[in-house]
Amino acid sequence: MNRIVFYDFNNINHSSFFLDGLLKNQSAYNYKLVVSKQTPEFLLGTALDREWQKHLFAISVFKADFGDGEFFFCIDTLDSALREAGYNIPLLNLVKFYFKANYNATAIKSDSVLHDLAHKIYPTTPFCPLRFANLWKLFPRISANPDTGWTYQNAKTRIKRLPTLQKTDRLRSLRSAPKKLDVLFVMEYYANLLHKEVKDMRFQIVSALANNPQISAVAGLTCIEGLPEELAHLRIERFNQKTYFELLASSKLAIYVRGPHDCLSFKLAEYLALGKPIVGQKIFNNTQTLNGFPHFTEQFAYEDANSILAQIENLLQQPEKLDELARSNAEVFDAYLTPKIAVSKILDQITGSEEYAPEQAERKANER
């Protein structure tokens, strides 16, 4: 029987969405998904090789065996669209297909290395951590593996994370929740410099919401290690995942901000799954596809806290518009962005069922 082997050594937040889709597509594409705790042969002995080790936590590696030969492919969910921070070049050279969540055609064309390998790089959809069937298969290996970067701490984190993942159908079922709140905007505080620009934007939005009596909001910053003194007044208790999504579903709209390196945030897929109207910053990656969806360019058009707050106040006065955006975003998710549908596009490509070169994405979005 045809097989797709998933090499289990990365962060489950970055692979669970795609594993859910691979499991749900097994019958339609006539293969079996196998989870392997073994080290893929090309990583053996690479523990000291910086280029091979780069970013493996956010890249899902697979081997496809469809009877007429084997080949490797991967799904890269790294934040950056640029070569240094956003690609594992040895892996890109090795695999037959390199699917990229933060796909950016301009970044590829402007980099000589990526340009030469562009025929292997394909866009894939926004994603978020999700629960999937046979969760026990992802119970982690406990021992460390220097060739994949896996550590004992990774195992502990995986064990804690697995039970908290929410099912796609659970998020969809929350669409009809009564709307008791205008906005929920709770963000994690990170102390590292990489998040500085993102942090500044989030602080401004949280502060603006806290000081705006016209908007009913739950807004704040969570932090495991504590906030700096000047931000202590913005602290909010961390919600468990079940409570967080219930609160988010009870809000009238959602605020979207880009992640580090201007990446697509987990929250984009979460908001769409919940059918939330969105007020957010512009989308810079995978634009050929995403900006072709209805109402996306009008929802993702605001670059600072003041314009975001002004648009929130504007939409709260237009309940019919909120309903229209909610309905449209739910329809986009259900028609194009569920794990099953997103992964079917990957499978079409690797099985040769569909010609889906990256340069065709813009034409397809326009035809839509």
Image (spheres, helix red, strand yellow):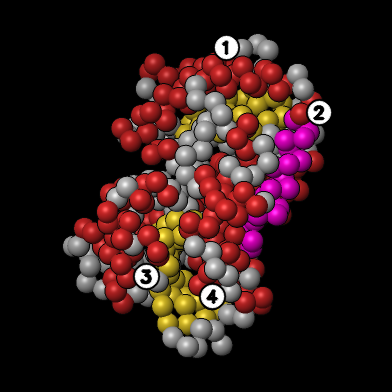
What is the C-alpha distance between the residues marked 2 and 1? 27 Å
Frontmost residue, 43 versus 350: 350
- For disc 3, the marked residue is 95
| Residue at the spot 67% in from the left edge and 37% down from the top edge | 295
What is the C-alpha distance between the residues marked 3 and 1? 51 Å
Numbered range of the magenta stretch: 322-341
Q: Secondary structure at mark 1?
A: loop
On whether residue 198 falls in the magenta region, the answer is no
Q: Secondary structure at mark 2?
A: helix
- For disc 4, the marked residue is 352
Image x and y of residue 329, in percent: 69, 42
Q: Are marks 3 and 4 in contact (CB under 8 Å)?
A: no
- For disc 2, the marked residue is 320
At label 2, counting other C-alpha atoms closer than 10 Å, the crowd grade (few under 14, some 14-19, many 20 or more) is: few
| Mark 3 or mark 1: whose residue is earlier in sequence | 3
Frontmost residue, 203 versus 365: 365
Specify the amino acid type for callout 2. Glu
What is the C-alpha distance between the residues marked 3 and 4? 16 Å
Q: Secondary structure at mark 4?
A: loop
Image x and y of residue 80, in percent: 38, 45
Specify the amino acid type for callout 1. Asn
